[in-house]
């Protein structure tokens, strides 16, 4: 009975329709083949046989995979998602869809969860495929790292998906939405590697405050979490590692790195849904 109710909800119908539309898109298959091909290339080049700071085999491959994902996933999610609502509005698809028995909330969250699934599943399959292939080739599979990396990827996608949907709702045109998303991405990337911290330290701001502000950047949080799993002592981050690891434990920081981006995505998603219901979106 519960599953039948879900099946007949507008959220489910919109989600399925959006997934089928994405499956017909060349962007989706290019994106999927990119991650699958990247894993295949890493295996073929023997990256699993190299070692760095004790990481070898699939652990080495997963670390590289996460670094590449941090570069590709945010901009891909932003560019492909910010056109969702504003694009439907400009093409008059939204006017037709909302003339059907579809609620505003069902329409918004249906698109939201469809985009999440269509973005996360190819990345997860690529990572899972690497783990399965490693098992067949008798490599040691770090399943604990696999689960943590999967959760980090899901939280980052959810974060930028919420931001993208919010931008799509409040933007008046596709060009404005894409420009806003690209500028946001540039700002977040510019403040990676603790550039913001260097600027604030120059202004003689307290080091704890500097690092706290730096951790507001979800990309910085994701990158630091990957480094914590890669290097428990965070030696690659220099003096900043002492402030981070002395403030919170490694396990607590990993939890924060998963919960914080998810909360950001959920918050922007809620705001996007609120404006979508209360503004003249047609």
Image (tube, helix red, strand yellow):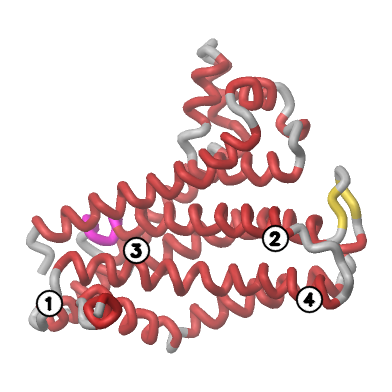
Q: Which residue is mark 3?
A: 82
Using the numbered discs, state the Cα–Cα distance from disc 3 to disc 1 in whole angstroms.
19 Å
The residue segment tinted magenta is: 166-171
Using the numbered discs, state the Cα–Cα distance from disc 2 to disc 4 in whole angstroms.
15 Å
Camera-near label (1 vs 4) is 4
Q: Is residue 111 above or below residue 239?
A: below
> In the visual, does 230 lie left or right of 177?
right
Which one is earlier in the sequence, the residue at label 2 or at label 1? 2
Using the numbered discs, state the Cα–Cα distance from disc 3 to disc 4 in whole angstroms.
35 Å
Q: Quadrant of residue 32?
A: bottom right
Quadrant where the C terminus is found in the figure: bottom left
Circle 2: element type: helix
Circle 3: element type: loop
Circle 1: element type: helix
> In the visual, does 183 lie left or right of 89?
right
- Which residue is at 62% across, 44% downward? 223
Q: Quadrant of residue 59?
A: bottom right
Q: Which residue is mark 4?
A: 133
> Residue 208 at what x, y percent from top left?
54, 18
> Residue 122 at what x, y percent from top left?
56, 74
Q: Which residue is mark 2?
A: 65
Camera-near label (2 vs 3) is 2
Q: Is residue 14 visible?
A: no
> In the visual, does 63 lie left or right of 5?
right
Q: Which residue is mark 1?
A: 98
Using the numbered discs, state the Cα–Cα distance from disc 2 to disc 3 in whole angstroms.
25 Å
Camera-near label (2 vs 4) is 4
Q: What crowding class fits label 1: few (fewer than 14 Cα within 10 Å), some (14-19), or many (20 or more)?
A: few
Which one is earlier in the sequence, the residue at label 3 or at label 1? 3
């Amino acid at each position: 009975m519960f599953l039948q109710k879900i099946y007949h909800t507008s959220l489910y119908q919109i989600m399925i329709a959006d997934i089928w539309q994405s499956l017909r898109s060349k962007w989706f298959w290019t994106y999927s083949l990119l991650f699958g091909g990247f894993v295949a290339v890493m295996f073929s080049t023997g990256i699993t046989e190299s070692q760095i700071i004790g990481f070898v085999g699939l652990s080495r491959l997963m670390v590289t995979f996460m670094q590449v994902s941090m570069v590709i996933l945010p901009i891909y999610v932003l560019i492909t998602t910010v056109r969702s609502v504003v694009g439907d509005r400009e093409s008059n698809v939204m006017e037709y869809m909302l003339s059907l028995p579809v609620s505003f909330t069902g329409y918004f969250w249906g698109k939201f969860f469809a985009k999440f699934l269509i973005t996360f599943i190819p990345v997860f399959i690529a990572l899972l495929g690497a783990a399965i292939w490693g098992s067949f080739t008798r490599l040691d599979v770090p399943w604990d790292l696999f689960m943590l990396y999967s959760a980090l990827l899901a939280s980052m996608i959810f974060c930028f998906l919420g931001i993208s949907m919010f931008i799509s709702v409040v933007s008046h045109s596709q060009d404005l939405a894409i420009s806003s998303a690209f500028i946001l991405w540039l700002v977040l990337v510019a403040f990676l590697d603790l550039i913001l911290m260097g600027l604030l330290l120059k202004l003689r701001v307290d080091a704890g405050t500097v690092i706290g502000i730096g951790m507001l950047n979800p990309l910085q949080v994701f990158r630091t979490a990957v480094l914590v799993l890669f290097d428990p002592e965070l030696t690659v981050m220099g003096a900043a590692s002492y402030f981070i690891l002395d403030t919170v434990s490694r396990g607590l920081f990993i939890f924060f790195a998963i919960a914080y981006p998810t909360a950001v995505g959920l918050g922007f998603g809620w705001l996007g849904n609120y404006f979508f219901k209360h503004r003249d979106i047609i």
